[in-house]
Image (cartoon, helix red, strand yellow):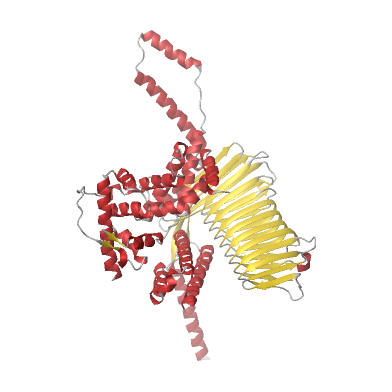
Amino acid sequence: MENNNDILKNAIQNLPEYIPEENVWISIDNALSKKETLTTLPNYTPPESVWNNIEKSLSKSGQPKPVLTIRLKQIMAVAALLLIGLIVFNNLKSKNSSISHSEEWTEVQTTGEWNDNNELKNVLNLICDNNPSVCITPEYKQAKARIEQLEQSKQIILKQMNKYEPNTDLEIMLTKIELEQTGLIKQIMQKTL
Amino acid sequence: MPESTNEKIIVQGCLQNNRQAQKNLYDKYKTEMYTLAYRITNNFEDANDALQEGFLQVFENLKTFKGNSKLGTWIHTIVARVAIKKIKNKIHFVEINDSITNNIIDWSMLTDVRYLEEAIASLPAGYRTVFTLYEVEGFKHKEIAEMLNISVSTSKTQLFKAKRLLMEHLKNTIS
Amino acid sequence: MYKLKQYITALLIMIFLTGLQKTMAQVKVHVMSRKINKSINWKPGMTFWLTGERAEIFCATHQKNTIDFEIEIISKNEDRKTAEADLDKMKLVDQVSGKKVSLRNYVELNRGESKPESDLKVIYHVKVPENCKVFISNYFGKTRVIALKSSLTINSKFSPVKLQNIAGNITINSNFGDISIDSIYGTVTLQTTRSDISIRNFSGLLDIHSDYATILLSKINNLTKAAIHADKSNINLNTGDYNRYSYFISTTDSKIIKPDKMHPDIFKEEKTKTQLHFNAKTNKPQITIELNMGIITIEN
């Protein structure tokens, strides 16, 4: 038996949502493009002479050639066509490309100085503990959702940071995110005071 | 423009392999589906894979969608199945009979919703899947049973067990 | 004198140690790179689509009827073998399909292969005919386009965009990528989130929808019309002479800073809403602004 099921239903309504990384769409896009490109490979119609030769061989032997042999020839023809198609379609790698190697001295970039996700969660939990009535207000929920969205963007950016090159642009983005998150926390705190 | 008309236009575009239309459909449902995939698989890497595979299946099979259900529901089912497949080997169900023990589950102790997400994530794969599909995503026991290849009664009892475990976890965490 | 010598010696030792520390903090990195050059014939009506990931894109124009690419894929790692292996994971595809020329890069992993550990990037130097329509998507990179005389569409995420000397229709969707536009003639439509916008030397029509932005417009002497819809943004207009334009501004929870000499036809302030009309009944080029939570500054 279950009592107070409405509390569970309400809690489920307030569960967080997660936004996928852009990489997921890029992978889908690539897979779709590959599929589409393979369907645009050209088809080739064999000349009539091919069938004539097959027919001649069939008549000579007096028995139809084993289906297996004909099938094998068809499979080989398709494989050859696919191979030609793949060579035509892809592989910028093999055209005009050369690999070069060099060495450089560089500083290893660190990302540790960016705020830990848990710090923000702890601050939000603390606000709720001290003033529970604030946590059910739409403004708090909106602010919290925005903070979480920003945190997701921040995690995406952190994963993309370079180890051996400066990350100036990304650091600017991270700074903006943290400023916005701090602004939102300040807003929430002002409402509780 | 009414949403259903807008969605029809997007679907038409998808059927013509228009990438922008496909992206629009993806963008419309990505958060919901990703969240579903994450809750079932319990990790973001698998959720990424499930979302990708799920949507590729959606685009491939869109021509077979006959409009018997809402498009969102149809996509939901596809992504759920793909996510379940990802964790198939982690899901273990024991078929038990209908007699459930007389434990009462009382949610009045769920005073803090913050802990619910953590508690769901702590459930074993099978319980978590059934709970998520039934309580969070709104699938029926018959649909869940078909997805997980179990009986309807197993689905019901596993749900009850999941809720009991959830409550135990919440009690320990909140206290 | 002796003390001075001591002081200088101590200073030199400190400088040396600091330099030494910095040198010791540096590591030797293997840089593997692959260069690809290609040229594709172009006919009027053909469009160019570039989809980049971790790409630095430089797109300019030339007088030839070809689309020329010079692409460099770079992989950096302390371990040479890893750098080389990761270089191979970055794929490049080019395709001509009817009137569409497309070029893209992406990371491809075979089954069981791990994600690249090296710093990977792709640098594109692309030259297109002046009248070629260009479509660019970039994710975690940089995009720079100059001297185009046709339409340009950019979808950008986490990638700053710089445009210069372009005449045509420009559409930019940007998320977390600052936009800098200089010397543009045409119609510009910007849809941005968390991307600062800087526009100078602009002639034509401007339509901006933005959230969380700092928008700077300066030297916009030949502006035909501007419409700005912004949320949680700050807008700074430096038109050179505010009297050349008519303004229709409405804001919520915002502040308007204007020159003292600027006397609006209508200036209403009600609780959280403010309305300002200036030169309303003239045929002067219109600047329409709707702002929620921000500051508008009209300079001279």
Q: Quadrant of the C terminus of chain C?
A: bottom right
Which residue does the image show at 36% across and 65% down from the upper left?
B113
The number of discs equals 0
Residue with the most extreme right position = C282
Residue closer to the observer: C20 or B73 = B73
Residue A58 in picture, x, y percent from top left: 39, 11
Residue A126 is at least partly visible in this image: yes
Decide: is A92 above or below C165.
above
Which residue does the image show at 49% across and 53% down from the upper left?
C74
Q: Is residue B98 left or right of residue C243?
A: left
Residue B65 in picture, x, y percent from top left: 45, 39
Q: Is residue B99 left or right of residue C141?
A: left
Decide: is A115 above or below B47.
below
Residue closer to the observer: C249 or B141 = B141
Residue A106 in picture, x, y percent from top left: 47, 64
Which residue does the image show at 55% across and 46% down from the upper left?
B6
Decide: is A165 above or below A58.
below
Q: Is residue B41 left or right of residue A52?
A: left
In the figure, residue C265 lies in which quadrant? Answer: bottom right
Residue A168 in picture, x, y percent from top left: 53, 65
Residue closer to the observer: A46 or C17 = A46
In the figure, residue B66 lies in which quadrant? Answer: top left
Residue C241 is at least partly visible in this image: no
